[in-house]
Structure formats: structure tokens, C-alpha cells
Image (spheres, helix red, strand yellow):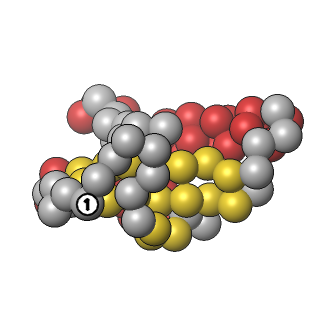
């Protein structure tokens, strides 16, 4: 997954949490062992990082083709 951004008019109404919850449910139903995501580290992405942490994601190192980058944060959720 990549970072999500909610339109300004929809913020604070649970849209991002609902979308993330549905994606997690879908991953579980498909038998995935974990969900990995990358998002930014700039303050612009702070709300997204808090959302992921509230849903149980924990920080981890880079995965796949990603490399250590001060502008990226990597998260994992075990299913």
C-alpha cells in the first residue's frame, strides 16, 4: 500500500479509516500474512502515519526495492 490522502472536505469524517479498514479486511480474506506500506516522513504525512499506527502498523525497515531514505517511512501490519 502507499500513503493515502483524504480530500480536505472529507477530513475528520472517518473516510481514510474506513478505506484502510476495508483494505486490511481484503488482505485477510485473501490469506495475506502481512501488509507493507511506505509513506513520507515530512509533516505533510503525519496524519497518515498516525492513522496507520492506530490500526496496528509498526515501523520497520525498507522492503522490496525500497532503500533507506530519510524521506520515507516503512510500516508493517501482521495479519
Residue density around tag 1, few if under 14, some if 14–19, many if 20 or more, within 10 Å: few
Q: Position of residue 35 (x, y in %)?
A: 61, 48
Q: Where is residue 61 in the image (x, y as percent from the top left)?
A: 41, 65
- Please state if 3 lies on the left or on the right of 79 as rendered: left
Work out whether residue 9 or residue 49 is closer to the camera in this orientation and state it. Answer: 49
- Residue 1 in the image: above or below residue 12: above
- Residue 50 in the image: above or below residue 17: below
Which of the 4 image quarters holds residue 60?
bottom left
- Name the residue rendered at 44%, 69% in the picture: 59
Q: Where is residue 22 in the image (x, y as percent from the top left)?
A: 67, 36
- Name the residue rendered at 76%, 51% in the picture: 33
- Please state if 64 lies on the left or on the right of 71 as rendered: right
- Name the residue rendered at 64%, 36% in the picture: 23
- Residue 1 in the image: above or below residue 46: above
- Please state if 18 lies on the left or on the right of 30 as rendered: left
Q: Tag 1's secondary structure? A: loop
Residue ID for mark 1: 68
Work out whether residue 62 or residue 26 is closer to the camera in this orientation and state it. Answer: 62
Is residue 18 in view? no
Q: Quadrant of the C terminus?
A: bottom right
- Name the residue rendered at 55%, 59% in the picture: 76
Amino acid at each position: 500500500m502507499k500513503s493515502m490522502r483524504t480530500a480536505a472536505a472529507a477530513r475528520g469524517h472517518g473516510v481514510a479509516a474506513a478505506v484502510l479498514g476495508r483494505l486490511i479486511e481484503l488482505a485477510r480474506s485473501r490469506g495475506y500474512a502481512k501488509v507493507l506500506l511506505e509513506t513520507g516522513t515530512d509533516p505533510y504525512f503525519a496524519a497518515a502515519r498516525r492513522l496507520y499506527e492506530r490500526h496496528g502498523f509498526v515501523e520497520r525497515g525498507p522492503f522490496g526495492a525500497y532503500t533507506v531514505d530519510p524521506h520515507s517511512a516503512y510500516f508493517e501490519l501482521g495479519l
